[in-house]
Amino acid sequence: MTPQDTAIELPAPAPGTPGPPCAYAALRADQPIARVRTPRGDSAWLVTRHEDVRAVLADPRLVRPLMSEWPPGRPAAEHAGLGVRTLLEMTGDQHARVRRIIAPLFSPRRVARYAPRVRALAERLAGGVEAAGPPADLVAGFTEPLPLMVLCDVVGFPYEERDRYLPLTDAVLRATALPLDEVLAALAALQEYVTELIERRRTDPGDDLLGELLAGVGTQTGLTREELVSFAASVLMAGYKTNVQHLGNALLTLLADPGRPRRLREAPELLPSAVEELLRHVPLMNAIVVTVATEDLTLCGRRIRAGEAVLPVIASANRDGAVFPDADRVDLERTPNPHLAFGHGPHYCPGGHLTRLQLRVALATLLHRFPGLELAVPADRLDWDEENPLRAPLALPVRW
């Protein structure tokens, strides 16, 4: 066995940082595809270069496994065989059809219509932060509630029922840290909740995306009821906690260098490029993407056998110096910026434009409302959530 065949531990971010792990730089240089051990002890192939990650995400021979079926060879879980696949797990003609239906709902033009609503929510929260007075915690007062309020307003989840579905969503996202049966039970309960919500909404669809999609259920051009459940559950899993984590880390990245917010106040036209750079530099999702080979194939010169797992690391790809000069530096004017924050290929995140809008509005609101916004404590003294794959500061105390 050669050194490159020996499995290494999956790299972890340094404490007190969102990532990505520093070890990815060495892997990109010397082992662009490396055999690793996952936190559960399973073997997989880790892919770290931008070009290779992009190729893996678009390769139809590499598919997302059902959560209840990976890794193979373990005892059957109590909730194995869940009937509803998430959008990430759908493949083939069904996935293509569902994407054709939902993609127009998240187009740049459609998302632009939500800007006034998102801006009003951000202004309301910023007003609460201002009323609390400095020092104020931006996590509790702004970055935690805003993504959920946007999802509830735009997609149609009841904000007043958040105590029912948020704990289930968090449990699913912590899949690597919890027992499998517990994760699958949470996923089953989340799907049950969404099914119940959709049934309640039949008589009053409402002016939101769930209502619009519900109106098409059962028609030739609409989703099936099962697909609508899948859409709603997928949006909760992909659109809430990831945005909370990223928004908090993006604000920390800006405020860690006083020159960055000052530059955006002086040149607000740079905000769109700043948003793209923050999406590149700050991991949008630290959870590892899992794909499984459906047939034997060659990747980066290594032979991958059918059934083996391949883990494309988006956070590493976005720091690849071959694509992004001076990749570890935050450059708010970086262009071009072909980051992979929203993935690539058939499973490219359809909600990417809504995330961009939310981040752009959040930054513009805070920079305008608080011209002197700064951290109230040194960045290295912040407390972090180190157990969750979606790493972020537990609090972000600021003054102005």
Image: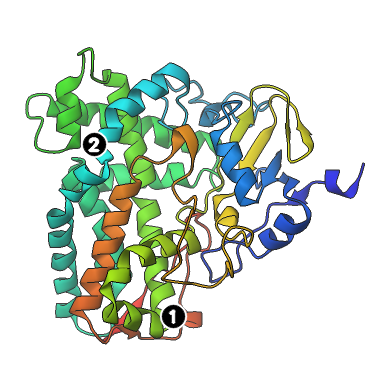
Residue in front for this viewpoint, 381 or 31: 31
Image quarter hosting the C terminus: bottom left
Label 2, residues with CA under 10 Å away: few <14, some 14-19, many ≥20: some
**Kind of residue sitting beneath label 2:** Leu
Q: Secondary structure at mark 2?
A: helix
Which residue, given by chain and number where applicable, does mark 1 sit on? 256
In terms of secondary structure, where does tag 1 sit? Answer: loop
Q: Tell me which corner region of the image, top left, top right, bottom left or bottom right, holds residue 258.
A: bottom left
Residue 246 appearing in the image: yes
**Mark 1 belongs to which amino acid?**
Ala
318 versus 369 height, above or below:
above
Give the x, y percent position of residue 90.
45, 25
> With respect to residue 221, does 36 lie above or below?
below
| Residue 312 in sight here | no
Q: Residue at x 33, y 40 (%)?
A: 235
Residue ID for mark 2: 105
Work out which residue is located at the far right of the displayed protein and give it. Answer: 1
Report, in whole angstroms, how far the alpha carbon at label 2 lies from the one at label 1: 36 Å
- In screen coordinates, is 48 left or right of 186? right
Q: In which quadrant of the rendered image does the N terminus lie?
A: top right
State if disc 1 and disc 2 touch (CB < 8 Å).
no
> Residue at 28% across / 18% down in the picture?
224
Q: Residue at x 65, y 47 (%)?
A: 39
